[in-house]
Image (cartoon, rainbow, N blue to C red):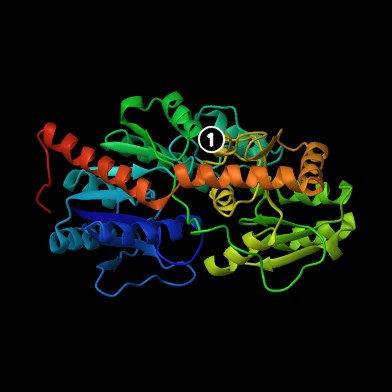
Amino acid sequence: MRILQVVGMYGRAGGAENHIYDLAAAFERGGHACIVVYGGAGLDLFHVEGRPEYHVPGLTSKALRPGEQAARALRAVLHRERPDVAYVHTSMEPGAATLLARALPVVFFAHTHDLYCPAGSKHLQRSDRVCPHAAGPVCFVQAFLERCQPRRPGPLARNFVQMRRMQEWARNVEVLQVDSRDMRERLVAAGYHSDRIAVLPTAVRIPAGPPSGGPGPRPGPRVLFAGRLTPQKGLCYLLQAARISRIPYRLIVAGEGPDVSSSRALAKRLGVADRVDFVGWRSREQMDLLYGDCDLVVVPSVWPEPFAMVGPEAMGHAKPVVAFDVGGIPDWLEDGVTGFLVSPRDVRALAGRIDRLLENGDLAHRMGEAGRAKALRLYGQDGHVRTLVGLLERAVRGRTAAGGGRSAV
């Protein structure tokens, strides 16, 4: 097959972007051609010699009116490359989205909550809890009460209109892919047909053998947090847990984001700044060293994580995980088997579970090994790609059965 991957960012920015890069290589190893269309370049543009890669300005524009520039550029790519199917990872400018769906069968990977939440997060920021409301007029009220999205009428209305347009578009694609059962249930509750939704967890990089730690001895235990520093990722609760822990572990914080300064200030106010290392964004190779050098990984997210790749990555490195019980996290974290699930925002329970693993090396080792076995079984690249190719072929068959196929562009 000739597979068109449509992405928002094509560069070294985060787990989703690295996954897209890995997929392109995996498609090619499997004998498929991969064409990449992207809206932005991320921190550092990916580039592979011989792979068709096209920058389409305005591809992910939030404009209310369909434009011509992105659709015109996309039409030229389709005409030149003649792909068989589109694998879409991002919301698109309305004109480009309409063109693509008319031209090709589509598998849309819903990475976030954009199809049923105008904020895209299902997180009420002020009360710091998962939003229980279905999208509707209540969203405009919650924007003012909870600061979950912009309060200004213009941006607020634009978010809502864009969500409605994406809903209409996504209801007509051949396959909707999600990472977890939680995402599937949310889509069904929002009115999407269950028979078009496929749960396929994102593949993660798993080392051939449990990697060793960093160079040289290290004093004392280490706990790792990895993720974008935003309120939804819950680092503030981990910092509070570090303050009341019985064990003075070193907390490594890997990631960048708008909450860097406030997180540093909070660590100082809590009196744990001397035990917290903010190491910033780290490459894959550097992350491998951090995984290998820690005793456990904590995922204190308070929004309904669609998947949270950091957890399965940690499991692949044979590390136990402690996480809040939200979103898709229970799909991969088996409480008491591969780590511990904790009620969201329960700082005391979070600290207690971390302490238990740091105090009991045998338990931590058993959970780490169980996690690695599960990661190898469920989250490896080869099995993921085989299933994904099946979904793409299903989309092509679905379009053909409906009397469609690739239209003229």
Relative height, residue 25 to residue 147 (above, below): below
Q: Amino acid at mark 1?
A: Asp
Q: Is residue 240 left or right of residue 3?
A: right
Q: Nearer the viewer, residue 263 or 322?
A: 322
Residue 158: tell me if it is visible: no
Q: Quadrant of residue 367?
A: top right
Q: Which residue is mark 1?
A: 331
Relative placement, left or right, of 289 versus 264 is: left
Expressed as whole percent of the image width and height from the top left, the position of residue 246 reads: 89, 48
Please identify the residue farthest to the front as the structure is shown.
362
Give the image location of residue 31, x and y in percent.
Answer: 21, 58
Q: Quadrant of the C terminus?
A: bottom left
Task: Tell me if mark 1 has few (under 14), some (14-19) or many (20+) residues whose alpha carbon lies within 10 angstroms of its own.
Answer: few
The residue positioned 31% from the left and 31% from the top of the image is 196
Dot 1: what SS? helix
**Residue 129 in view of the camera:** yes
- Of residues 199 and 151, the one nearer the viewer is 199
Q: Position of residue 347 (x, y in %)?
A: 80, 40
Q: Name the foreground residue: 57 vs 283.
A: 283
Q: Nearer the viewer, residue 31 or 7?
A: 31
Task: Locate residue 155 relative to residue 366 in the image: left or right.
Answer: left
**Picture residue at 52% right of the left edge, 29% below the top:** 137
x and y percentages locating residue 327 in the rendered image: 57, 35
